[in-house]
Amino acid sequence: MIYRAVYGNADIYLLDDPLSSVDAAVGSHLFKEVIQGLLKNKCVIFATHSTQHAQTADEVILIEKGNVVARGCYEELFQLGKIPTIVMDRVDDVTRERERKRGDVDVGIKTAEPSEEAEERGTGTVGLGAAWEFIRVGNSMILVSIFTGLNILNQITLSCSDYFLKIW
């Protein structure tokens, strides 16, 4: 939803981990083109668990369990050892938790190699007759009408909210 924020053309942007739902290449591209590009003259508050883009920030605030642990530019925090310590502590905690859950039972256990099975692939199209029969048999013509109407109403609502944000 970064595009909606940028489309609103605000002075301040609060982005709560917007790159977590995309892969690394797309995230890198979005960060470079949108956050460093389109939003370069705006105030951007970028909350994330990743330290990947912290080097480009004017100020970095490290928060752990709701408390501010460190604050400053990336270079200062890196030289003080704050960033690697916090990241490594988190990795150690996750590793310890996994080992605790797993126990020592995984030692010496061999896993089966994944097997490849041929999958049949159908080609062609499903005609409207099949879709109509599916609707008729399920006695769901009313439901299809309701869902279609709600979908249209939803699209109108979303379009109006974007328009309202534009003129506001």
Image (cartoon, rainbow, N blue to C red):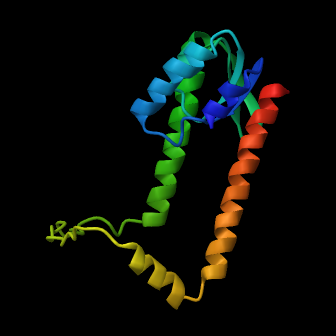
Q: Which residue: 55% across, 38% down?
A: 89
Most extreme residue toward the right is: 168
Lateral position of residue 82 relative to residue 102, left or right: right
Q: Is residue 38 above or below residue 30?
A: above
Q: Considering depth in this image, is 12 or 96 the residue closer to the camera? A: 12
Can residue 126 be seen by looking at this rendering? yes
Lateral position of residue 48 relative to residue 104, left or right: right
The N terminus lies in quadrant: top right
Q: Is residue 70 above or below residue 4?
A: above
Q: Position of residue 80 (x, y in %)?
A: 59, 15
Q: Which residue: 61% across, 74% down?
A: 144
Q: Considering depth in this image, is 48 or 19 the residue closer to the camera? A: 19
Q: Is residue 64 above or below residue 72?
A: below
Q: Is residue 127 above or below residue 151?
A: below
Instruction: Answer with the quarter of the image where residue 114 lies.
Output: bottom left
Lateral position of residue 95 relative to residue 140, left or right: left
Q: Position of residue 101 (x, y in %)?
A: 48, 65
Q: Which residue: 60% across, 83% down?
A: 140
Q: How many marks?
A: 0
Q: Position of residue 97 (x, y in %)?
A: 52, 56
Q: Position of residue 135 (x, y in %)?
A: 52, 82
Can residue 62 be seen by looking at this rendering? no
Q: Considering depth in this image, is 3 or 140 the residue closer to the camera? A: 140
